[in-house]
Image (spheres, grey):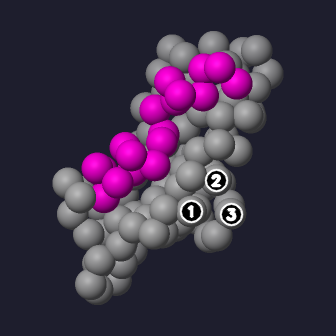
């Protein structure tokens, strides 16, 4: 718990991202840590300026074109499940354009 303050996904960062990202822009994230995944889900779901494209409280499938990092490969080899997130920035009519973001 002492390292929670170092986690990237925090309310303050989400506030800043929602201000600089255009409405409808998609924030794609992934982690192999179950504990951090729950933390991220809790913070993203609670943020008023983001909407979960996979459905409320759900993890997203791996997006098409996702580039697997060495960290992800290492986690998979260790048997850890990779959890993906896809959240769009809310805005006036912005989400009607999010259909271009597919989970194929």
The image quarter in which residue 93 lies: bottom left
Q: How far apart are marks 3 and 2 (CA)?
A: 8 Å
Which residue is at the front of the view, 91 or 100? 91
Position of residue 38 relative to residue 68, above or below, is: below
Which stretch did the figure color magenta? Answer: 1-18
Tell me which residue sits at (65%, 43%) in the image. Answer: 39
User: How much space separates mark 1 and mark 3, taking CA atoms?
Assistant: 10 Å
* Magenta region includes residue 51: no
Image: 77 above or below 44: above
Between 103 and 33, the one nearer to me in the picture: 33
Check residue 12 for magenta coloring: yes
Q: Name the residue under label 3.
A: 57
Where does residue 62 sit, x and y in percent of width and height? Answer: 56, 46
Where 80 sits versus 13, above or below? above
Q: In which quarter of the image is residue 54?
A: bottom right
Which residue is under mark 1? Answer: 46
> Image check: 31 left or right of 101?
right
Which residue is at 56% across, 62% downward? 46
Q: Which residue is drawn at 60% across and 33% down?
A: 31
Callout 1: helix, strand or loop? helix
Residue at image mark 2: 42
């Amino acid at each position: 718990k002492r390292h929670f303050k170092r986690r990237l996904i925090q309310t303050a960062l989400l506030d800043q991202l929602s201000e600089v990202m255009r409405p409808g822009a998609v924030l794609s994230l992934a982690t192999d840590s179950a504990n951090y995944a729950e933390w991220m889900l809790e913070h993203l779901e609670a943020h008023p300026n983001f909407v979960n494209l996979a459905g409320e409280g759900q993890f997203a499938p791996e997006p098409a074109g996702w580039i697997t990092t060495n960290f992800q490969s290492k986690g998979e080899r260790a048997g850890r499940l990779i959890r993906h997130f896809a959240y769009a920035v809310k805005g006036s009519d912005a989400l009607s354009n999010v259909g271009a973001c597919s989970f194929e």
